[in-house]
Image (tube, rainbow, N blue to C red):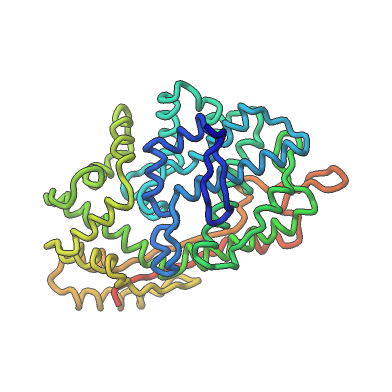
Amino acid sequence: MPAKKIFNDPVYGFVSVPYGLIFELIEHPYFQRLRRIKQVSLTHYVYPGALHTRFHHALGAFHLMSEAIEVLRGKGVEITDEEATAVSVAILLHDIGHGPFSHTLEHTLIPVGHEQLSEWFMEVLNHTFGGALDMAIAIFQDRYPKPFLHQLVSGQLDMDRLDYLTRDSFFTGVYEGVVGYDRIIKMLAVHNNKLVVEEKGIYAIEKFLTARRLMYWQVYLHKTVLAAEQMLVQTLRRARTCTQAGDYSLCSGPLGFFIREGAALGALGSDRGELLRQFAALDDCDIMYAIKTWTTHPDKLLAFLADGLLNRRLFKLELSNQPFPEEYVSSIRDRIAESWKGVPDAVDVLLLSGAERNAAYHTAHGEIDILFKDGKVRPMSESTDYELHSKTVTKYFLGYPK
């Protein structure tokens, strides 16, 4: 048997996966489930090619981690074979806790974030594999005595970000989001056990931060994408309302479990095992099947939302740099109320409002450290274009039926 399994990735070409623990984790049903979860949710409603999955992304991040390990070792950084396997496992499983449609339904089906769920799944897998994930979990939780390994998994320049920007720009065709991942990786180094970037890589970092900012506003928070995702959230909320009113015919199986019980799952206690079992059986297919079923549901609001999602009859969504005037919001409320006379809750369900915020560079999560030729390390915030990247932009949205 050959030493490695080869995957043909459209972004990087051939990705080599060693047989043994890593390949066995990929073969596990928890990981295979990622094939059925779209990486960028409903973004394909705007960019038709954006149908790639969390499975693609996890393999891509693993591939970049392999390259980063090789580069760092070439610069004299001590990374044992055991550490290399552990950090590769950590990046491979970093998103295993994502639910259907990735970030869109996070905290809607269950009040627990995907990072926490990923950690719980890793603990279950660690038990399954007889403690083989001990070091990977320590790296994932930033408890391992080499902090740079955690930074490669979760940090300002982690392999997660490098892959999702590269992959999402590829599949959407938004080339403004292309980053020089290969140059960035080759510029990585370790100083005092912390991950740093050599001085000559600073412009690649600035391009990376600019690309990240553009991808957020042009792709991830595109107003039509945002309209679709907000409609999806509202559809699940309406289904839960109908269930609480006594309609238990909405759906069965794992989705039914989370619609009925999800709001009460904050204090998991001894039920964590059952929750993970149900969550591991839940993916995009469950949601889409339910939406197709709900298009003919007697609840008019649920049927309207489901039909709109299924057939891309999306709400109009407006964006503003300032909160919308109350008089304008009231006029929209009045129009909805007039169009949906006699339907209780219509305004509350069909008027979508809120705000989205993004900054390309959050210093609260640690800085990108630059290693200069004189041997000194200075944070990225001292670079000339820092303000451009660190500024938090807030956009308010208002959505309603056309």
Q: Residue 334 lies in what quarter of the image?
A: bottom left
Residue 89: horizontal and vertical position, in percent? Answer: 53, 35
Outermost residue toward the right?
374
Residue 86 against residue 330 in the figure, above or below: above
Q: Residue at x 40, y 48 (%)?
A: 35
- Figure disc tally: 0
Residue 364 or residue 367, whichever sits in front: 367
Q: Which residue is pictured at 45% across the width and 34% down the height?
A: 25
Q: Is residue 98 left or right of residue 362?
A: left
Quarter in which the C terminus is drawn: bottom left
x and y, in percent, of residue 85 in the image: 58, 31
- When asked about the image quadrant of residue 70, the answer is top right
Residue 148 percent location from the top left of the image? 66, 37
Compare residues 122 and 32 and report the one nearer the observer.
Answer: 32
| Residue 48, x across and y down, in percent | 42, 67
Kindly give the residue lying farthest to the top in the view shown: 130
User: Residue at image x 67%, y 47%?
Assistant: 367
